[in-house]
Amino acid sequence: MIGKVLGNRYEIVEKVGGGGMSVVYKAKCNVLNRYVAIKVLRHELTSDPDFVEKFKQESLSAASLTHPNIVNIYDTGIEDDIYYIVMEYVKGETLKDYIKRKGSLTEQETINIARQIAEALKHAHSNKIVHRDIKPHNILLTEEGIVKVADFGIARASSSSTINNTSNVIGSVHYFSPEQARGGYVDEKSDIYSLGIVMYEMITGVVPFDADNHITVAMKQIQEKPIPPSKKVGNVKISNALEEIIMKCLEKYQSYRFQNIEELLISLNAINGYSRINMGINDADDLDSPTIIIPKVENNEDPLNEKIIDINILDENSDKAFKTFFGEYDDGEIDGKDEKDKKWRKKSKKKNKGNNEKPEKDINENEDDHKKNLKMTIIAILSALVVAIMGGIIGFRAFFYQPEIPVPDIRGKNEEEAKKIIEELGLVFEVENREYNNEFDKGEIIQQSVEEGKKVKKDFPIKVTVSMGNKEIKVPKLIGKYSIEAPVILSEMGLLPGDDIKEVYDDTAPAGQIIDQYPAENNPAKEGDKVNYTVSLGPETSYVIVPKLVGFSLNEALAKITQSGLVSKIEEKYSDEVTEGIVMNQSIASGQEVEEGSSVTLTVSKGPEETNTPDGEGEPSTPENPSTKTFPLTITLPTDRETVLVVVQKVTEEGREIVYSQEVNTSDQSIIVNVKGTGTQVFEIYTDNVLYDKTEITFD
């Protein structure tokens, strides 16, 4: 793939990682001149429609999400049977590598990383997508410390169809939730459980559940409660608050965990003493100010020098202001007198002077009365204006204002009674959910969406959850099932394994099978009740050591078998090396521990096979060396294969001589090879051309 160009723009530069389903490469986008990461489906999987569908699901799931803590998807395509996804290139390392490098993280690091993962999950959950595979391997850390959640390959929309196939559990066994292990309903709280395990591993350096095989780990996820992190952290300090958060995330039942990721975020933020709103971007600060064209405003005055006039304050300067506005003033009151007012004053003086020439005093009194009347008129007009404005304000507020209503506590009340209380207050009563509950009777309110005492507007909806009463549970049948199945069966019914689980020997049931239970099948039970059961250990057996039988006469061998509590079977074979009546081989090697009553097959020598020689055609052969003797060499066969080539070589000063070479069946467990020699000689034994043993034999 190195150097290949996909989509006429993405040039593969180097391989940066890979998994069971895909390989990730670093590539350069020749159009935008930037580096990207390209995930390519493995070639051997392109013919499998299930893997292709999962690969497409990843691109669809992640492409619909845009968030700073989620790896962005740029493009996707198919070229020459190469399925690929183009995504943001993150320069950094996985959280798993970071934990391995540091051993464990500090509490503050754990909180900071967990918060960013939670923010990413919050965005995914708000878009109705459940990740289902949250683990440190799928979380990337940039060089700037920013968390990026990746790999939405098994993500699913959070709907009623979000159910695992019980025969094909999806996820990573060390990190997935109990409901995933059972193949049950998966929702946002399943991601919260996985995030709890990631937090546990960050603070302790280890996962809460581990074993030699995946089945055992899955069973622990379902059955066992994790050891609190504070008992595993060593030198790293962990606060009670963080430990409580982790343990709540790891509750076996979904309803006991945080109900949504927002609750988890609030709890994480509370450890550092600040509220949720301080963590993100405050939307109230983002003013909607679109770009528009407006005419130029001509204003030479400094707007900051504008003065605000309070119409409720009337001082000695107000009278002068009123007179200026209405044109009533004396000659010496202000500068720049109006020409019309000058003429009016002169005309008045001439009229008064010509009319019997009344004293100046009367004229002044008339002018004073005129001024007083005018002043009163102005005050009346202003008062009416103020009253009108205030009335308008009050009327406006009265028209739009709605009184706030304190919400009562209706938990524990009957549904009909609660509905009546809410509707009489002018609020809207809505049943959001109905569920089984052991604490509240059927029809009672379990919880309400708005807490008691909070004030809301008229017609505000109050959503409630109504109890369906105790769930009718009947004890399932465990007898005949195996003990490894019992916790899963009980968990699906809301029950728990009891504290008195017994194991007894039983001749009629195989080991591991349940032979008794209490309470019995179909008995009524409540959620959380415990069921005890008895598990068979199988038939009680005794074990004996197989004695050495090779080289003994048949009668001696039979006596030893009888004393050991074993059963014998006898086979006879001709042999040129072993004396007639002597045991040549035993089916179970000596020293091995077997069940009492086991059968051992003895191979007994019938002596040399007789052959008819035509008259005058040869004489019975005589040993080349009268001092040559025979020794039965017992060879234990390996058990890791069905057949094996056995070669025995005699080592002499002149060289090596093959005295035995044959492929034998290992079901016999051991064979006897009669070797001949004089004095003391060395023999080497080879199995499948590999030196198996070297022995020194002294021939008497």
Image (cartoon, helix red, strand yellow):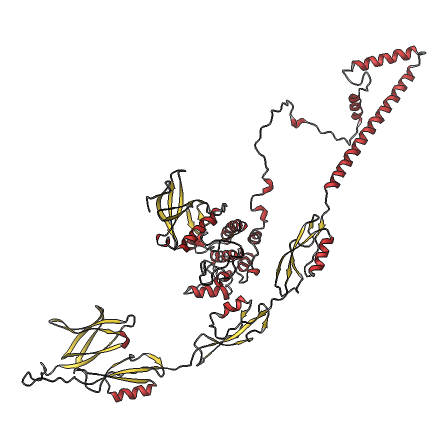
Extreme-right residue of the structure: 356
Q: Position of residue 196 (x, y in %)?
A: 51, 57
Extreme-left residue of the structure: 616
Is 401 above or below relative to 218?
A: above
Is 396 above or below relative to 513?
A: above
Residue 139 seen in the current view:
no
User: Which quarter of the picture shows residue 296?
Assistant: top right
For residue 187, side relative to residue 460 (left or right): left
For residue 130, side relative to residue 572 (left or right): right
Query: Which quadrant: the C terminus?
Result: bottom left
User: Which quarter of the picture shows residue 584?
Assistant: bottom left
Q: Position of residue 147 (x, y in %)?
A: 47, 48
Q: Position of residue 674 (x, y in %)?
A: 18, 79
User: Which quarter of the picture shows residue 637?
Assistant: bottom left
Q: Position of residue 595 (x, y in %)?
A: 36, 81
Residue 531 seen in the current view:
yes
Q: Residue at x 54, y 76 (%)?
A: 518
Q: Residue at x 72, y 43 (%)?
A: 401
Q: Nearer the viewer, residue 292 or 263?
A: 292
